Amino acid sequence: MIFIADFHIHSKYSRATSKNMDLENLDKWAKIKGIKVLGTGDFTHPEWFKGLKQKLESAESGLYKLKGAGDDETRFILTSEISCIYSKNNKVRKIHIIVFSPSFEICEKINTQLGWIGNLKSDGRPILGLDAKELAKIVLNASQDCFIVPAHLWTPWFSLFGSRSGFDSIEECFEDYTKYIFAGETGLSSDPEMNWRISNLDKITLISNSDAHSPAKLGREANVFNAELSYPTIIEAIKAKDPAKFLYTIEFFPQEGKYHYDGHRVCDISLSPQESKKYNNICPNCGKPLTLGVLNRVEELADRPTNFKPKGLIPFKSLIPLEEIIANALGQGTGTKRVNQQYQNLIKEFGKEFEILLNTSEEDLKRATLAEIAEGIVRVRQGRVSLEPGYDGVYGKIKIFSQQEQKKLSKQKTLF
């Protein structure tokens, strides 16, 4: 069975998330997007965990569904992100880790242990003064079937390789527990191709998830499997890096991520790694240190050239969310009435966003929507986009149509 999975999301109990991040809305939006398996996020939070136990029932092994839901409904997999902030080798480390659990009972064991270390009620993504290696030990002691994945590997402030807070290798972080780290999450500001340049990462599988803070952002990155629907099968397909079962990941164009380039948001300064080097990584405007982005950090640790392809890789496809494509084609902002109307029309016609982005033919798209929207979807599939990289917490900008084309389109609309 071919299905799409997004493992890393947050509930309404996490900081800076939408109040609509509840199970009912997650279920509804997973169906709109075409996601079959969705992480619950935040199983360490007492209130959210209580709700999960009340509202979900067992489906296939290690997967859950909303009580009373049919067999074709969304499946939930128990996941949580934990923020480990601690000092190691005379440096403060800030690392986010995604934990997968096969059952509520195992979650309870993990939550009890972590509750002795820090306050799990304060945030859906708890901040614990705990070494990442010690977290791995606690989780795997609860059950060997748990799965530990370093989140958004390259984000400057909170990740394993982050320029501000991370390590230079998986071994430096997890020491003798490295043998239990089978996967890493690319994050929005990097894609697999960038990660392939680091031979240290050959031994792990790269996965991609949305890290969504609102329902409409589900699936902006995801994983596509052709396997039996169950927790053990999914985890095994990832661990084994099995291309027959783990087909590909769905990625942001990494330039669209918030930390692709270097920069200083306050001064409106965005720089490539080469430009930063000229300024000794200091902001030319105010003299403070630049936030060094993902590309810079990849360049620093890379031991292979650009475009290197290791053996046994899982391929990927770069996409842009449908709402952004429509907004781009119409020359309007996301969330506007007209963009929403066109989005709803396409969902009504073809059922699921991923079906539209990945599979619907150009002819069918042209029949169902405006020619420029159909053209936009096709261009994204072909990678024919221009990109202004994100930096220091500012999302990158993607243009599917040039300024000239945009003027032409708006002229046509005015005439029409």
Image: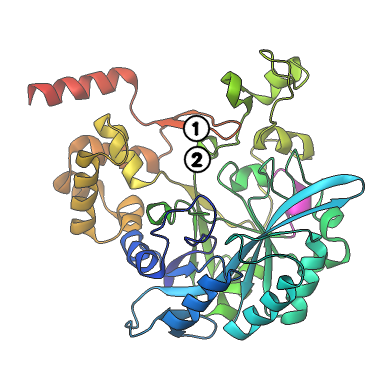
In the picture, the quarter occupied by the N terminus is bottom left
Label 1 crowding class (10 Å Cα cut-off): few <14, some 14-19, many 20+? many
Horizontally, residue 197 falls left or right of residue 414, namely right
Question: Taking 378 as reference, is 53 above or below it?
Answer: below
Q: Give residue 182's position: percent from left, percent from top.
A: 71, 65
Does the rendering let one see residue 228?
no
Q: Say whether marks 1 and 2 touch (CB < 8 Å).
A: yes
Q: Secondary structure at mark 2?
A: loop
210 and 81: which is toward the camera: 81
Which region is colored magenta?
A: 196-203
Main SS type for the magenta part? loop
Does the rendering let one see residue 46?
yes
The residue drawn where x is 42% and y is 52% is 217
135 and 153: which is toward the camera: 135
Q: Mark 2 highlights which residue?
A: 253
Question: Taking 235 as reference, is 280 above or below it?
Answer: above
Q: Which label was assigned to residue 414?
A: none
What amino acid type should be assigned to the residue bearing mark 1? Answer: Gly
The residue drawn where x is 27% and y is 29% is 331
The residue drawn where x is 44% and y is 85% is 57
Horizontally, residue 329 falls left or right of residue 244, namely left
Outermost residue toward the right?
Answer: 89
258 and 236: which is toward the camera: 258
Per the image, is 199 magenta?
yes
Q: Secondary structure at mark 1?
A: loop
> How far apart, in angstroms, are the residues tagged by discs 1 and 2?
9 Å
Quadrant hosting residue 293: top right
What amino acid type should be assigned to the residue bearing mark 2? Answer: Phe
Q: Mark 1 highlights which residue?
A: 396
